[in-house]
Amino acid sequence: MPARRSIRRWRSRSGLVTAVSAALALPSVAEEPVWFLKEDPAGSVALWGVPDTDAVGFVVTCGDREMVILSPALFAMTEPQTEQKLRFTVDGDTFVRDARLVFSERDAAWQASAAVATDDALLAALKRGHAITYDFAPPLRPGDAFTVSLKGSADALGDVIEAC
């Protein structure tokens, strides 16, 4: 758990990539963040982060009725009073989707996610793109736009999408 708290502090200051990089300096974390597939009782989950740690910056799961749930490491610190949107920019192409915010006891914040259809153009962009930047639209506070690599995402994302 101490590593998770450290990551949260870094994330609020300068972004998740810095947070994961900071976590890599910890003796217990020796790998760089990558896209990988994890089997869960509910099905396959695609993650961007450091395998076998809590250092995860993006999670993609299968939802109900041919929907995919995108859960970036993006949090609102107070309960949203209005509907929120998420902005995903993949290699210069911007996609804005409705956000769902659910309170996370573990993170003590409102976790953002977006449900998209399995044939959504955003998913195709994620599979073929080089990098994704995500944020609230409009931003809730400066410094919350995070960028992660999409290198290696196609297979992991494809497995999750196909399972839906």
Image (cartoon, helix red, strand yellow):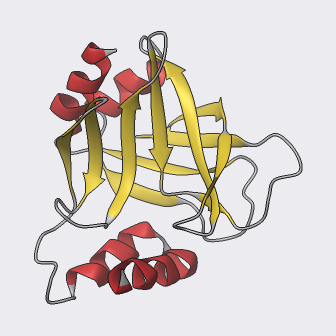
Above or below for 137 versus 103 = above
Residue found at x 16% / y 67%: 32
Residue found at x 41% / y 46%: 132
Residue found at x 55% / y 27%: 115
Left or right of 122? Residue 81 is right
- Quadrant in the picture for the C terminus: top left
Residue 9, position in %: x, y?
A: 51, 83
Above or below for 154 versus 34 = above
Residue 109, position in %: x, y?
A: 64, 65
From this viewpoint, which residue is outermost toward the left?
30
Residue 93, position in %: x, y?
A: 50, 33
- Quadrant in the picture for the N terminus: bottom left
Q: In which quarter of the image is residue 34?
A: bottom left
Q: Quadrant of residue 118?
A: top left
Of the pair 18 and 114, the residue shown nearer to us: 114
Residue found at x 10% / y 77%: 30
Q: Quadrant of residue 25?
A: bottom left
From this viewpoint, which residue is outermost toward the front?
41
Of the pair 102 and 85, the residue shown nearer to us: 102
Task: Give the mark count.
Answer: 0
Above or below for 4 versus 77 = below
Residue 75, position in %: x, y?
A: 61, 60
